[in-house]
Amino acid sequence: MAEIRIHLDTCFLIRALVSGTDADRHLRDWLAAGHRLCMDSIAWTEFLCGPLQADERGLAEQIVTERVSFSEQDGQRAAEFFNATGRRRGTLSDCMIAATAAGRDAALATLNPDDFQCFEALGLKLLP
């Protein structure tokens, strides 16, 4: 299987840190396959807001070795996503996360696909 770049959504990372969950199994499979696991700075900030157990941040830093900064281009794409999907209240951070992944041709791993499916028509790829 070819290496793919996978951006993790906050909820996915939180659940993947729980041993034995589906998210944990997917994460282990992706790591074993050599896929690049990333997180954008928006999702990483959400994760750091916690609450976190003492060892969770360190473990997350080992798993997600690349944290992607939110760029001006990401901002433009996020605004396009927001406007194209009806300017729905409370969705701006999802637009930002989706735009960052889509702009880097990465798939987004999320446990909330309903929150992100509207962005697939705009170029977002969803996992698992």
Image: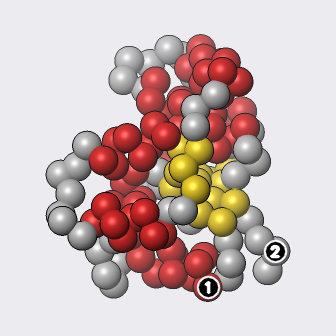
> At label 2, which amino acid type do we have?
Ala
Q: Which mark is residue 32?
A: 1
Q: CA distance from mark 2 to mark 1?
A: 12 Å
| Rendered location of residue 120, percent (x, y) | 67, 41
Residue 84 visible in the shown view: no
Vertical relation: 60 (above or below) 70: below
Instruction: Report x, y in % for residue 19.
Output: 31, 81
Q: Which residue is mark 2?
A: 2
Quadrant of the snapshot with the C terminus: bottom right
* Residue at (33% x, 84% y) in the render: 20
Q: Quadrant of residue 57?
A: bottom left
Q: Residue furthest right?
A: 2
Pinpoint residue 16: horizontal percent, then vertical percent: 38, 70
Q: Nearer the viewer, residue 124 or 37?
A: 37
Q: Earlier in the sequence, mark 2 or mark 1?
A: 2
Q: Find residue 4 and report its horizontal and vertical position in percent.
A: 74, 65
Tell whether 54 sits left or right of 80. left
Total numbered labels: 2
